[in-house]
Amino acid sequence: MKERLEVIKKAALEKIEQADAMDSLNDIRVSVLGKKGELTQVLKGMKDVAKEERPIVGQMVNDTRAVIEEALEKEMTLLKKKVREEKMKREVIDVTLPGKTHEKGHRHPNQIALEDLERVFIGMGYEVVEGPEVEYDKYNFEMLNIPANHPAKDEQDTFYINKDIVLRTQTSPVQARIMETGQMPIRMIAPGRVFRSDEVDATHSPSFHQVEGLVVDKGITFADLKGTLEQFAKEFFGPDTKVKFRPHHFPFTEPSAEVDVTCFKCGGKGCRMCKGSGWIEILGCGMVHPHVLEMCGIDPEVYSGFAFGIGLERVALLKYEIDDMRLLYENDKRFLSQF
């Protein structure tokens, strides 16, 4: 038995000395000290040893186990140290390199302008409503009093999916959908992306954003429209801002107007931004056409309303004095980091 233990110990120590990886040492531990290992098999053979010799053999097995475990632990420590040293050589840190900065993201100027605009109208009791970007011709044109032969329906201006479905050219279809529900009164704005077949330049894009507003209730007049837009202009562009209404034509409103505000750069004195006029055009508006109300199931003898449409990019360009709309979409960090 003593000779057998010596053979086991000698073989184990030689294997430990030759091991060059942690996995090899673990394999040796299992093969010698494990439940089915060589030393365990020796202990199981104790029943064949004379009773008076069992304590001596047991002690020999324990001594052999202790020697092998000590050798394993020592070799494992050396291997761990070696692995750590090699890892440190691979992961040398150059303390002369500049530190890594963690940049925080922030809102896009378009989003800042939209949130400011929404804040103004929500403060006046308006609800923010969204609708589909792929729209039926019925809602995009017909229910807004735009007949089949109207220039706005020309394929040069509109992206048609088929003869009945288009990429919406405005967010006004959301207004038609809300009016169609018949739930009065209505005070809403409809922000969203719209599409028109325009060439990309400093003031045009085939995809841009609008914010359409609508109020329908009993007794609504042009004076309500004027007061609403004056309040919006003062809160959005500054308390000294004045508004001017110029007659215009829109198929879905009557009477209609375009709205100018005093130039917030020069205060109305005339400068490069306002081209010397002192005024800057910002939106179109008007009283909802009676026929539009009728098509949406609203009695124009009982209800009246006003609508307006704001180009989000336009007011963002004006507010932040940006002279090229393409800057909003080019994702140039040098430009966006200014906001």
Image (spheres, grey):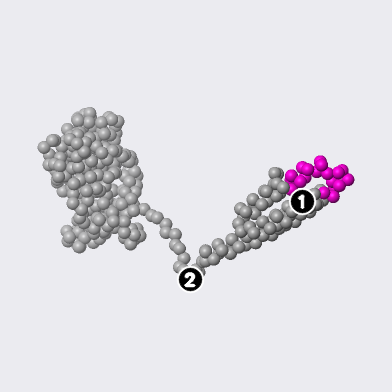
Q: What stretch is highlighted in magenta?
A: 39-57
* Of callouts 2 and 1, the N-terminal one: 1
- Identify residue for label 1: 4
> Is residue 40 covered in magenta?
yes
Q: Nearer the viewer, residue 144 or 117?
A: 144
Q: Is residue 181 above or below residue 242?
A: above
Q: How far apart are marks 2 and 1 (CA)?
A: 61 Å
Q: Position of residue 42 (x, y in %)?
A: 76, 46
Secondary structure at badge 1 equals: helix
- Residue 75, percent from left and from top: 67, 59
**Residue at 34% from the left image edge and 49% from the top image edge:** 115
Q: How crowded is mark 2: few (under 14 residues within 10 Å), some or many (20 or more)?
A: few
- Pick the residue in front: 97 or 42: 42
Q: Element under label 2? A: loop
Residue 154 seen from this side? yes
Q: In which image quadrant can residue 15 be found?
A: bottom right
User: Residue at 32% of width from left, 41% of height from top?
Assistant: 128
- Check disc 2 and give the amino acid type: Thr
**Residue 110 shows which numbered tag?**
none
Q: Residues within 10 Å of mark 1 (few under 14, many from 20)?
A: few
The label nearer to you, 2 versus 1, is 1
Q: On the picture, is 102 further left or further right than 144?
A: right
| Residue sitting at the far bottom | 96
Q: Which quadrant of the rendered structure holds the C terminus?
A: bottom left
What residue appears at the point 70 percent right and 49 percent down from the top-left corner?
32
Residue 104 shown left or right of residue 212 in the figure: right
Task: Check disc 2 and report the residue beneath it.
Answer: 96
Q: Where is residue 215 in the image (x, y as percent from the top left)?
A: 26, 38
Magenta region's main secondary structure? Answer: helix
Q: Percent x, y for residue 186?
A: 29, 35
Three-letter amino acid code at disc 1?
A: Arg
Residue at position x 23%, y 61% in the image: 266
